[in-house]
Amino acid sequence: MSLSDINAGVLGVGFIGVAHVEALRRLGVNVVGVVGSTPERAEAKARATNLPRVYASLDELLADPAVHVVHVASPNHAHVDQARAVLAAGKHVVCEKPLALTTEETSDLVRRAEASGLVHAVCYNIRFYPLCHQMRAMVEAGAIGEPRLITGSYLQDWLLLATDWNWRLEPDKAGSLRAVADIGSHWLDLARFVTGRRVVEVMADLHTLVPVRRHPAGPVETFATTTGDEDLIEERMASDDAAGILLRFEDGARGVLTVSQVSPGRKNSLTLEVDGSDSSVAWFSEDPEQLWVGHRGRSNEILQRDPSLVDPDVRGVIGYPGGHVEGYPDTFRALFANVYADVEAGGPSPEPTYPTFADGHDAVCVLDAVRLSSDARRWVEVERSTGGAGARAASR
């Protein structure tokens, strides 16, 4: 099957669902239809953003033999049942993060996906900024020595005001964690990808800095704001606006992460620095074309995103020549290009080049430990057994 013969459907017509559609179209994949929370909302969004056919339901989409791949870009609570249904229908699946809300659900999805022989991926797209792949290549090659300290942050301001609202603020839809699960999980996945080391223990302090919010009765689009003339409902918040997390990685490396969705002026600001025994590398998402390389005994360097300058294995995720800026939408295209190479081949390769359901499970295991650590106010070990609760209190 060639790429132009592959048909995809997308569940969800919000900000991320539309991003999936646009990236697939750029890649040359036929997007044959979408499913929204209601057919009426999906039809309205389809007219506004040039989306394809609207299916009345997931069942209708799955019953269409023309659909080969389904992208799950719905609210968090729906992921597990929808991903199970896609796999049961014999279709490849790309799921937004988090893969599910509990480690029991994610481990079940891993088992089902691996038994199915179908391609399964989780949309940790931040990995696919080219210079993040370059950081990984440098760490793997020993260019910075032994990684010792992994630090950074993921900061936004779209939930700063008491009238900012979205389904991510509703625990029954998003889960008990909010900022850490939404954007912190991207940073944690990126740190693991770049360093090749998993988080094994956490000490987390979760914050609810806007304790009471006021919101409309109906749904609010991600990153949208209220107009100020609605009748607003007042609601007390329990989930996290922000967090500070200490991390212990495999092989003894240490880490510190700050997460916030209430930082004024920070629109989508991810920073990651890996300090090694010889050199350091650091990257900033709002200036993604440059990688800082730090040295002790000679001048520091700035490496530009340019196919002629990066590691040969990195060139495959670069879409344009140096000086032609690649940004957030390009990460989806690069991720999906890797996923759809396996779809073309008929099934997952032995070592997929994209995050799989196993990576999605690992991320939820770390999130479990973060939640438990903040509740218990102590270090917590990350528990990765497929049948476990996801975390256990550390002995110290």
Image: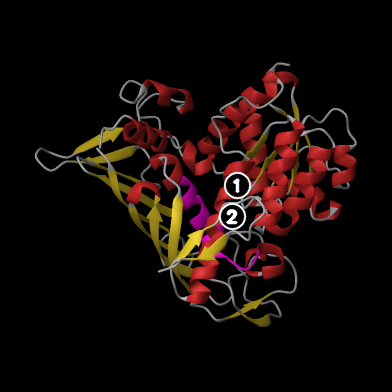
Q: Secondary structure at mark 2?
A: helix
Relative depth, front residue between 344 and 378: 378
Say whether marks 2 and 1 touch (CB < 8 Å): yes
Q: Nearer the viewer, residue 326 or 135?
A: 135
- Give above or below for 320 relative to 183: above
Farthest top residue in view? 2
**Between marks 2 and 1, how big is the CA–CA gap?**
7 Å
Indicate which disc residue 364 carries. Answer: 2
Q: Is residue 70 left or right of residue 348?
A: right
Which quadrant of the figure contains the N terminus? top right
Q: Residues within 10 Å of mark 1 (few under 14, many from 20)?
A: many
- The colour scheme is secondary structure
Residue corresponding to mark 1: 360
From the viewer's perspective, is residue 101 above or below residue 10? below
In the picture, residue 121 is in which quadrant? top right
Q: Amino acid at mark 1?
A: Gly
**Residue for point 62% across, 24% down:** 349
Report x, y in % for residue 356.
Answer: 61, 38
Tell me the kind of residue under disc 2.
Val
